[in-house]
Amino acid sequence: MALPTHILLLYGYMLLFAWVLVEQLGIPLPAAPVLLAAGALTAERQLSFPLAFGAGLMAALAADTAWFFFGRRYGHKVLRRLCKLSLEPTTCVRRTQKSFARRHGAMLVFAKFVPGLATVAPPVAGQNGMSTGPFLLLDGAGSALWVGALLAGGRFFGVALNHNAELLHWAGRFSGALLVLGIAGFFVARVYRRRMALRKLVTARLEPQELKRRLDAGEKVYIVDLRHPLELIPDPFTLPGALHISPEALAARHEEIPRDRDVVLFCTCPSEATAAKTAMALYKLGIERVRPLRGGYDEWKRLGYPLDAIPPPGAEHIELPVISAGKG
């Protein structure tokens, strides 16, 4: 079943260009197996190494340049969209921004070798005002290293196959299955990392007793009430110092959330579903000190802890302050 080689021989450099372009645009379809297969074919001279290298390089540069200009024009809107597309829970915009600031754009050279960084790096560079010339130079170098390394690895494997007829027969027979397994492994690894991140959020749940102790001690805690406005009509109260903000508004203005304290989220959903989902969204945006409140509003109220009265929904427009939320 020589599926990869047959497809590459049939569609050649067009397929290589399209596959790399799709992956670099943010669709989680790994291009590494195709580049490796193309490299193996160059060893048999069924594909040209320079042409394959050129096709992969042009695709990567085209996608990266598009994201660069989108990031320059639309900023955080583009980054939030990329977070929704990505299956990688550790894709962290703030971490990428810190890396960009620390290395002054040099991260573009190695970004494609770091999971979750390849697609986010170009729009971050555009958002931070990097000039087009230096971006193309550094991103071109990084793309060349990435494409060249994978093609060279495939070519090395192809040379080994040509010197071992039995290995060549085996690879030709099972290459399709190996490609499918490689892609499946890629997705399994990402799902596993996502589950580990969710498990981390579960263990990060904050007990109401601990939150009460912190508030009594005057600690600064950023508390967010995620309940729907209709839930406030029969019970117009909230936790002391809490802000009532929708999950969508909170994610849209994530840059205004302080990073120097815990962000406590609560709702009235079973198993804190809304709080957990919102916590994951904030985690992917670089806010790591986020903690859903175990039991949410209902548990806090059941324990008889103090509550603040809030105006009925629509009575006033609640703004999201920059850093002053929370008691203390």
Image (tube, rainbow, N blue to C red):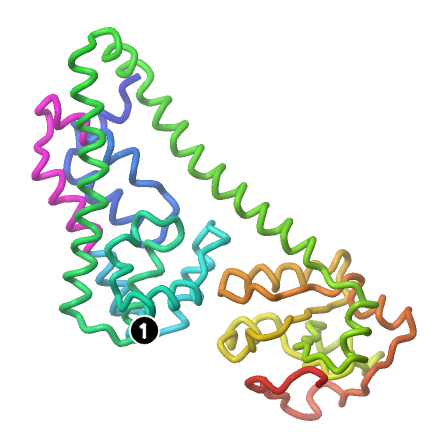
**Residue 303 % position (x, y):** 91, 70
Question: Which residues are the magenta region?
Answer: 39-61
- Classify mark 1: helix, strand or loop: helix
Which of the 4 image quadrants contains residue 266?
A: bottom right
Above or below, comparing residue 201 to residue 40 in the picture: below
Residue holding disc 1 = 127
Q: Identity of the amino acid at label 1? A: Gln
Above or below, comparing residue 240 to residue 267 in the picture: below
Q: Nearer the viewer, residue 163 or 182?
A: 163
For the C terminus, which image quadrant?
bottom right
Instruction: Residue at 36% x, 55% y: name it.
Output: 117
Instruction: Residue at 14% x, 38% y: name it.
Output: 13
**Residue 104 % position (x, y):** 27, 69
Which of the 4 image quadrants contains residue 321?
A: bottom right
For the N terminus, which image quadrant?
top left
State the residue lying farthest toward the top: 166
